[in-house]
Image (spheres, helix red, strand yellow):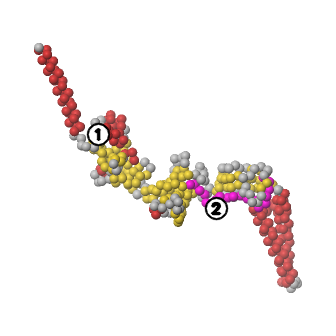
Amino acid sequence: MNKIVILFFLVLSMFTSCSGKKDTANSDDSSLEKDMIKLTEQQQSLAGIATSPLERTINPEVIHCNGVIEIPSDARVSMYLPIGGYVSEIYVLTGDKVKKGEVLAVLEHPDYIALQQQYIESHAQMLFYQSEWERQQKLQVENATMQRTLDKAKADYLGALSQTKALESKMEMLGINTETLLAGKVSNKVYLRSPVNGFVGNVNINMGKYVTPTEELLTVLGTDHLHVELQIFEKDIARVHEGQNVVFTVTGSDFEYKAHVKLIGKEVDPTTRTVNVHAHIDAHYPDLITGMYAHAVVLVTSDSAYVLPTTAVKEENGRNFAWIEDSPGVYRKIEVRLGSEHDDKIVVLPTEDQKNHSFVIKGAYSLFAEEKKQGED
């Protein structure tokens, strides 16, 4: 009997002790307000919690848009020859980088020789008529010649000069140096040279092919004035101005290229309701190719603002919330007003009280998840 009583009191004592501990724990939790969570140091470490006062930084207002890498129409050069010929050499392929004056291909034809001979003869005749006209001018001063003879000498000279200049223009179009030609170096070859720095576009020739004066031999794309042709919706165009900075990326790359607004179109496309905006690229980027698709942002303003990582904020039923640190290990959920979003940052419009707190900038997801779990218990 005594043993039974002793055992009863021992169990009662253990139950009372356990109840006391539970009440104490409940008492600690009950001190927390609604929307507050308390974590131990170990829990904070596992959740990756990190806090910081609101960061005040430059957070630009931006306009998102799409575009295409383009070159001006005067930088796309189609190459022809005024006289047909046979292709004897080709030194480039599509996509090759070329410099101004670089030989791209060589063509041959007997007509090139005949044209050069014609130029040499015309030039010599022009010099003869020039000399005769100058002689007749001197004779007239001495009253030793008739006006009619002087007029004929002048006409002969001007006619020969005109023919020589016309042939000289053909020489230039063929890429033949007339000074070298007059030195007696005649050739049946014509060297096709690049007119600009850039890249080879289409190559429409092959070895041995005969090309006519109307055939496009190849194209060269000048890259000195590469630009992005942006399409901006009409609702945003009023905020776009010349000189604004532009940042863009191209498909398959995360590298950010720099440009600035150069020209703004004056017409709205009736189908897409967009306006073309020409953005000049600020530096030479060898990897950019004409026709590439680009995603861009126009930096409309660069105002100073308070920002948080977008992962620190959660939208619930049309309202936005974040977490602040009330005391070590104790976090409180508060409603925040938000501004524009750019990249992984979002503008926060804090109250004066919120400016004095540290916000959870990492691990906020774990706090939202813990809050939801407690609400389900």
Q: Could you tell which of marks 1 and 2 lies nearer the N-terminus?
A: 2
* Image height of 187 relative to 26, above or below: below
Across and down, in percent, residue 226 comes to 59, 56
Q: Quadrant of the N terminus?
A: top left
Across and down, in percent, residue 346 comes to 39, 51
* Image height of 367 relative to 162, above or below: above
What is the span of residues highlighted in magenta in the rendered image?
68-87
Who's the residue at 72% across and 57% down the image?
216
Who's the residue at 87% across and 84% down the image?
146
* Image height of 8 relative to 359, above or below: above
Circle 1 sits on which residue? 375
Residue 110 part of the magenta segment: no
Give, as a three-letter code, the residue at label 1: Gly
Who's the residue at 64% across and 59% down the image?
75
> Mark 1 to mark 2: distance in Å?
67 Å
Q: Which mark is residue 74?
A: 2
Residue nearest the viewer, comparing 315 with 165:
315
Across and down, in percent, residue 233 comes to 48, 59
Circle 2: is it few (<14), some (14-19), or many (20+) Cα within 10 Å?
Answer: few
14 relative to 67 in the view: left or right: left
- Residue at far right of view: 144
Residue 143 in view of the camera: yes
